[in-house]
Each structure stands twice: as C-alpha cells, then as structure tokens.
Image (tube, rainbow, N blue to C red):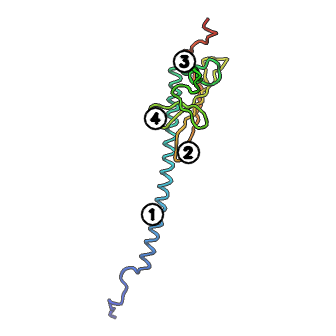
Amino acid sequence: MIHDLRSTKHGFTLIEILMAMSILLLGIVGVYAIFAVGLVNHKRAVDNTTASVLAGSVFDDIAANYSMYYYDRNFNGRPDLSEDGNSNGVPDWFEPTQSGQLRYPIPFRRGYRYDIRYERSHEVPQELFVSISIYWRAEDSERVETFQRSIFIKHLPLDDDQSG
C-alpha cells in the first residue's frame, strides 16, 4: 500500500485557529480584568495606609508636643486655637469645607486634611481620648477614615483656675 502524500492533512484548519485565538483572547481579557481590580484595590490600600500613617503622626505630635495649640481649656472637644479667638469667623490656617467644617491641612502631604476631637478625663486629667479623622479626595468623592487612641500626657499645662 502506497499512500498518496498529497491527500493527507497537514496543519490546522481555519476554524481550529479561530477557536484557539478566541480562547486565548478570553483568557487575556480575564487576566486584564483581574489586573484592573487589583490596581483599584492597591490604590485604596495605599490611601488607607497613608491615612493611618498620618493619623499616627498626629497622635505622636499630640503626645510629644501637647501645648496651647492642642490644649482645650473649656473641655468642648476642640483645641483652643481652633475656636476663633479673634472672632473673625475663620480660625488661622484652617480651610473651611463646603459643609462649614474646619480641618487642619497636613503640610507634608498634599491633599490630606485632618480634624481632631478629644475629651479629657476628669478623673485622670493627663489622659486624653483622641479621635482623628483624615480626609482626602479619591476619584470623584471625598474619603474619610477615623482613628481613635487614648493618650497619656506627661506635662499637662495648668488651667487658669489651677494656676493661682
């Protein structure tokens, strides 16, 4: 038996090649979709980590440099210097938002702002319960993360009624 070489099949048909390419294309699209989701999640994780680091920096600054800047003589939960001492309607170096809230800018990190709320314990005046909200713009909206910590102040300034 002699086989005629011209009649045997060699290679792939056009349909087989098109099916293989479509399967390959579906796989590539799936991988790119996973990359896109990963990129969005990475950006969100970086923003949250940055907010956490900045909040930690503010907590450390309060603990190390608790001065008249952070001091709250009337126990209203706002530092004295943010209470508009000159009655001009806007505390110094604050930037009001559209809702009227006042937020500190973070000088070394552009686009991030923070707001401090805290309470002093009346039983232990050196103990502060601090809540810091970090604000930043992400995509087309403003994001916020709030962090809380209890801080013990070693050198607490005296109130006016305690100094006499």
- For label 2, the crowd category at 10 Å Cα-Cα, with few meaning under 14, some 14 to 19 and many 20 or more, is few
Is 51 situated left or right of 8 in this image? Answer: right
In the image, farthest residue toward the top: 164
Residues at marks 2 and 1, CA–CA distance in whole angstroms: 32 Å
Quadrant the N terminus occupies:
bottom left
**Residue type at tag 2:** Ser
For residue 141, above or below residue 70: below
Mark 1: which secondary structure?
helix
**Residue type at tag 1:** Ile
The tag earlier along the polypeptide, 3 or 2, is: 3
Q: Which residue is mark 3?
A: 68
Q: Residue at x 44, y 73 (%)?
A: 20
The tag earlier along the polypeptide, 4 or 2, is: 4
Q: Which residue is mark 2?
A: 141
Q: Residue at x 61, y 26 (%)?
A: 118
Q: Which residue is mark 4?
A: 109
